[in-house]
Image: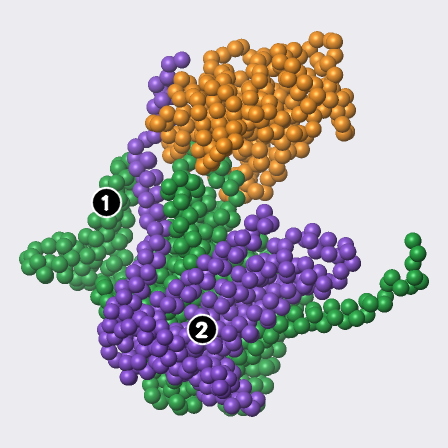
Chain colours: A green, B orange, C purple
Amino acid sequence: MAVDEGSWYGQDSGVSQVRGQLFEAICLLATSVGIVSVLILLLYVTLDAFEPLTADPGWHLVFLLTLVLPATLLAIYYYRSSDPAGEVAYVTTGLPIVGLLLSGGVLVVFAELLAIKEWFALALSLGAVGVVWYAHKRGRPSAVLERFGILILGTAVSVFGLPPTALARVAGLPKRIVSLRELVLELPYLPLSSLQVVATLTLPVAALAGLFVARRRASRRDGVVAAALIVTGALFGPVIDAVVGINGEVWVVLVTMTAVPVAVYIEGVVRRKEGVAGLAFPLVLVGGVAVGTVLVNALGFAGPDVWLDWSYLTSAPSTTPEEAGIYPALVGSVMLLLVIVAMTFPVGVGAAIYLEEYAPSNGLVGKFVTLIEINIANLAGVPSVVYGLLGLALFINFVHLPSGSVIVGGLTVGLLILPIIIISAQEALEAVPDSMRQASYGMGATRWQTTRNVVLPEALPGIMTGTILGLGRAIGETAPLLLVGIAASVGLAPAGFLDLTGAMPRQIFTWAFEPKPEFRYGVLAAGVVTLLAVLLVMNATAIVIRNKYQRE
Amino acid sequence: MTPDESTQSSASTGTQTTTTDGPLVDQQIDVDTNDARPSAETVIEARHIDVFYDDVQALDDVSIEIPEQQVTAMIGPSGCGKSTFLRSINRMNDLVDAARIEGELLFRGKNVYDEDVDPVALRRKIGMVFQHPNPFPKSIFDNVAYGLRVQDMDVDEEQVVEESLKKAALWDEVKDQLDSSALDLSGGQQQRLCIARAIAVDPEVILMDEPASALDPIATSKIEDLIDDLAEDYTVVIVTHNMQQAARISDKTAVFLTGGELVEFDDTEKIFENPEHQRVEDYITGKFG
Amino acid sequence: MSADTSTTEAITSPPEQATRERLYRYALFACAAVSILVTLGIVLVLGYGAIDFFQQYDPVAFYTGTEWIINRDKLGVLPLLSGTVLVTVLSAMVALPIGLAAATYLSEYASERARSVLKPALEILAGIPTVVYGYFALVYVTPFLQALGLPLGTFNVLGASIMVGIMILPMVSSLSEDAMSSVPDSLRQAGYGMGATKFEVSTGVVIPAAVSGIFSSFILALSRAIGETMIVAVAMGQSPQLISVADPLSNVFESNLPMTSAMVQLVQAENAGGVIYQSMFAIGLTLFVVTFLMNLASNRIAAHYREEYE
């Protein structure tokens, strides 16, 4: 074969190499353009919310030395060295943050929605039903329908009385069976409110934590010790209240929801001796902030003139920018979220279980099931504003629920994210290897037993991740809230589920049209950062859960 | 079709020599004639079973009587319906929407496909071990106890777990780590765990679908010894594509050939030394398959 | 052989367990059926509302009217449609090429490490609430563009459309990347084997092979842009304008009112139950039908594509 000397290689490659590199560069640029521009916008918002440039240079210097430098050095150290330390670092920092947010949520519920003693009465009445149900299960295990009836009827009687107060008044009945909940409320002497919280919140959490620890350490005794420690720590509440003045209930909630997960996690880390160095990170952060604050106060440096501070988070909106706050909208969002979770989690996961585990794939029912799946995929693509119309026409015009109430907003947004929850739960269930199901069926387990004992535990992290991401979407949705009448701006947080409420994204929308620049660049920025911070924590939690269980 | 070893039958009685491709050369198929168990009652009887997956026929007019407390092996090339037949016995095919069965399959005289038979209850009497070990992601103890809990059996869990693990020849290896995850065990150990799990609920029949095919030779031989012991207490029906294995451990052998047809079913000795049908002879001597 | 009675007993089902199992099955089916109820609800609500409206206002006038002035009872939907079309086209001009290029990079060029950083980063873009994007458009993007010298009003189409484009970017890039990754490696190998460069393989082999998946991602993203409400409600103002052929740049630099913000505006209007208010349902129906058809088309195309490689 004749070949021209040196001409089959090298001549064209110069041009095509340049072209190839240019193309790659353009594609890389494209990938980064969206990310970088959003990052810049986020930076702008944060700067506007916190106005760091208004602080003294000395203030910046102090915190640079006490906080930023040590934290960055430690982070670089983690990045260079073994991996577990870095992971331990961000989990130990993130867990308390998540715990604090959850505690905040619980405290907000107690402050606005349900007085502690009402919660106590409710918990006791539900607990009584549980005891009766368990006794029935032990005594007459085979009467399933009967037990189901007891569950429904018992809950109704115990919580609402027979017949419920409203109906009795309407029917004019003089006598009725008083509900257990009302009985408890009328007791002449109730235990201290912080102790009530201990009994109803801490005890179940301590029991769960104890079980968890017992399994991890393969020792029942250790589990009991852990549970006892938790309860004892919580019981310090009244003492702290008397001595230091921090609200007893706040202490109990903080211990239960923040200290417990962190302690359990740290116990695991210390026991496995993996990445213990990571535990230093949160200490460095907290220490840095503390030392920095002391120094700054001592040296008299002024801090930045932040828009987003504690008073912002706890005040109501106002026409004066400096006094405007987001508290009622925040509470509204929390309560909306409660409704959304209560509605979408059971229905969504139930639907996913049916579609994955129970649905036949042929025959008449099978065709109907395929229709359901196609339908769900389509629902996921319907614009959010149409869901708002649905909520408006269905819940407000047809069922006559109060316009702009928590329950209407929650149900509407719940319907919006229901398809998302179903789809992600389905994916999680699908990922469970079929061999596990076969093994379970082969041993004579029924479909429900297989689902509950084998499939669900395996799919649970995936389901949790999908749910948290779905809730993150729900918290930021505005269009349906607009159509359903959620208040543009509320002065008071809602006290019940039928009360008119605001919500964070709705409040942001209102502020966007305020003409004053302080609003547009200050208050609004603070609101946006608050919303984004909550979202960041939620998404980060979901991703951490997904990564942790995918590796396993 | 799985490639088969070529065989030459030798004139001497009782043994056949085979030559294989690969490292194991001149391996003998020993048919164990010494420990033949006494013939027994029929525990499972199939009468003219046909199984279809949509329009494809997987089993064609299979009739067989499986004796109690013996090891019955089902051999044949891949795709001939051995696993399908096995899964029809404990109605695992119910889980496949496209599967359709005709004919009768009797377990102690009762047709398991009758209207009033609950497949769940059936599987408590007829256990199954799968080709790839599939322990649950739980502790070893919880794996073995799973069947007990799911069937709400009123027994001393710890005792039953210990006995089952002993019968599965796994107790000594795991007795100190019952709470550790089953997934930490080796493949052979996991399969023995699955066997322990299956026998913990005290079934009458154990179905095994190529239980050792995913294991190394040492683990395989441990499983084979185990099967021999199991037949003391349970009826064992085992599907295998390894003819030497079938010859080693089974009392009776059924040969399935293309199209889901049960061509011959007889004492193992007879099948391997002197089968009635030419096709079976051809399969065993490796002329096809 | 007669049936062994103890065996028969053992393998027939205990009644209470069967009941319990059936209970669970029905309960779970009910959960799944909720989704059908939701769709039915949407269709009924929109249908009734639209019929109600069209009984009071001529549908032809509605769909061909070129003026949308609430106070004078002029309800022509064309200005709203043109607002929606403007936003969709502009955001497509941003999102589609950038998204496709990003997908190409992620699928063909990025290392594992880079992909593990960039993919989640793009997902974050999808997770930001749309009202925040609207805020960004209003408070940062528009002033920035104004500083560049463009004669934009405070509320304008350009800023909002750019943000809508960035919002739908992750959709395009993620779905297109999935489509491109599903192209079997053997095709790429065939290209390389013939002496093609990476650029030639990516643009000449992979992208054409993945074109239906890419196309379906485009349609989905556009449908999302059509249904987008908050960004346009915050950043685009409330003055409906027909597309002006005479002064094309005015379309982009001035404010406009797409269908979605029109609905928001209507619900905040004073007369609930009146004709004006009811028009919301007619607009909603139009919106629903358009996005539904687009999603259907996108699924069809994607399904067709999936068959080719199975």
Q: Residue placed at 69% from the left, 53% from the top?
A: C187
- From the viewer's side, name the closer residue of C244 and A243: C244
* Chain ID of residue with mark 2: C
Q: Residue placed at 53% from the left, 62% from the top?
A: C217
Determine the image quadrant of residue A161: bottom left
Classify B66 as above or below A295.
above
Q: Residue placed at 56% from the left, 74% from the top?
A: C94
- From the viewer's side, name the closer residue of B238 and B83: B83
Determine the image quadrant of residue A104: bottom left
Q: Amino acid at mark 2?
A: Thr
Image position, residue A299 (x, y; %): 53, 89
Residue A141 lies left or right of residue B255; in this view the side is: left
- Inter-mark Cα distance, 1 to 2: 45 Å
- From the viewer's side, name the closer residue of C40 and A343: C40
Residue assigned mark 1: A149
Image position, residue C305 (x, y; %): 56, 54
Few, some or many residues within 10 Å of mark 2 (<14, 14–19, 20+)? many
Circle on res. A478: none
Is residue A517 something one can see in this rendering?
yes
Where disc 2 sits, the SS reads helix
Classify C82 as above or below C176.
below
Residue B141 lies left or right of residue A345; in this view the side is: right
- From the viewer's side, name the closer residue of C235 and A171: C235
Residue assigned mark 2: C130
Is residue A501 something one can see in this rendering?
no
Residue C304 lies left or right of residue A531; in this view the side is: right
